[in-house]
Structures are given as C-alpha cells and as structure tokens.
Image: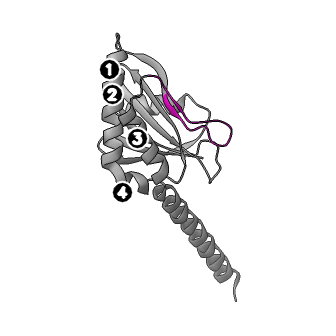
Amino acid sequence: MSFKKLLFIGSAAIVLIVAAGYVFTDMYYRAKYDIFKEHSPLFEAVKDEAERLMSKQEGRNDTGVTILYDNGGNASVDYFDEIVNASLQSKLRELDVLSEGKLSILRYSKQDGQSLIQFLFDWESAYGKPYDIVYCESRDILVNDYDSDTTEYVLDKLKGNWYGMALK
C-alpha cells in the first residue's frame, strides 16, 4: 500500500473517531435533560411557586441568591428555606424522587428584574458530572452568571426560557 493511501486511511479513521466522540458526548449531555422533557409541567409549577413566594419577600428589583432547597445528601437532612411552603416542599421532593436523588439544590435570584431559577443536579458528582436545569428570562444574565465561575459548561436551549447547563 502506498504512503498516500495509508495517510488517507489514517486521517479518515481519526476523523471518524473524533466525530463519534462528539456524537456520544452530545448524546450524554442531552440525556441529562430527559427529566425536564418528561416532567416540564412539574418544573413550571416549581418555578411559578418559587417566584410567587419570592415576590412576597422582595422589596427591590434584585435579590441575592436564596437557597430554597438543599438536599443534604448522606451528611445531613434536607434543608428548606423558611419561606418554602408545604406545597413547594412536596413538589421538590417529587422532583428529587424522579431524578433518583440527584436534585441537589434549588437556587433563586433576581438580577436586573429578571428571575434566575437554578435546579442543580448531582452537585457533588456522585453519579457523573453535575448539570443544571435553569429558568431565566434573559440568556445574557444566565451566561453572565455562569461565566463568572471558573467552570466550563455546555449550554443547551430546552424550551422557552429554560436551559440545560452541563458542567464539564
């Protein structure tokens, strides 16, 4: 076989391996959002209730980050902020069960008058890499919030103002 044929075959093999890696990585990240696709009405209900509860707490346009829910994991008990009513607690417990215990944190903040609601899954990387499902009315605020971190991520548009953030 000539050198040119070997070079062509080797190059083609490398391209196929890289393409397959990209496809499988992309499938891996997108599969994480199946919970949102299958239960988006529940995510909407949690978002609506969180916004309703937080609007009663707000006296200004912006708020700091409020942890509405924190799954204590093996180390401690689940934590709900004092404003989280029984209805929202029930919905969050349901999401935790549906995610097989991967729902770690529900964070709420308001920036420039826009809600930023972050559902953080597998925060401690017990089941793989962490990922977030995020509601934000402004993609710029969302990207700015994540770009301030030192972590890399893959951003996927899910539906409406919902995004998936797969952390690398």
Q: Main secondary structure of the magenta part?
A: loop
Amino acid type at circle 2 is Glu
* Label 2 packing within 10 angstroms: few (<14), some (14-19), many (20+): some
Mark 1 vs 3, N-terminal side: 1
- Asked whether the beta carbons under mark 1 and mark 2 sit within 8 Å of each other, the answer is yes
Residue 17's x, y, as percent? 60, 70
Residue 127's x, y, as percent? 62, 54
Amino acid type at circle 4 is Glu
Q: Distance between the residues labelled 1 and 2?
A: 6 Å
Residue corresponding to mark 1: 55
- In the rendered view, tell whether residue 136 sits above or below residue 101: above
- Asked whether the beta carbons under mark 1 and mark 4 sit within 8 Å of each other, the answer is no
Which residue, as the protein is rendered here, is positioned at the far bottom? 1
- Asked whether the beta carbons under mark 4 and mark 2 sit within 8 Å of each other, the answer is no
Q: How far apart are marks 3 and 4 (CA)?
A: 18 Å
Mark 3 vs 4, N-terminal side: 4
Residue corresponding to mark 4: 38
Q: Is residue 76 magenta?
A: yes
Query: Which label sits in the foreground, 3 or 4?
Result: 3
**SS at mark 4 in the image:** helix
Residue 140's x, y, as percent? 39, 30
**SS at mark 3 in the image:** helix
Q: How far apart are marks 2 and 3 (CA)?
A: 16 Å
Q: How far apart are marks 1 and 3 (CA)?
A: 20 Å
Amino acid type at circle 3 is Ser
Range drawn in magenta: 68-82
- In the rendered view, tell whether residue 85 sits above or below residue 155: above
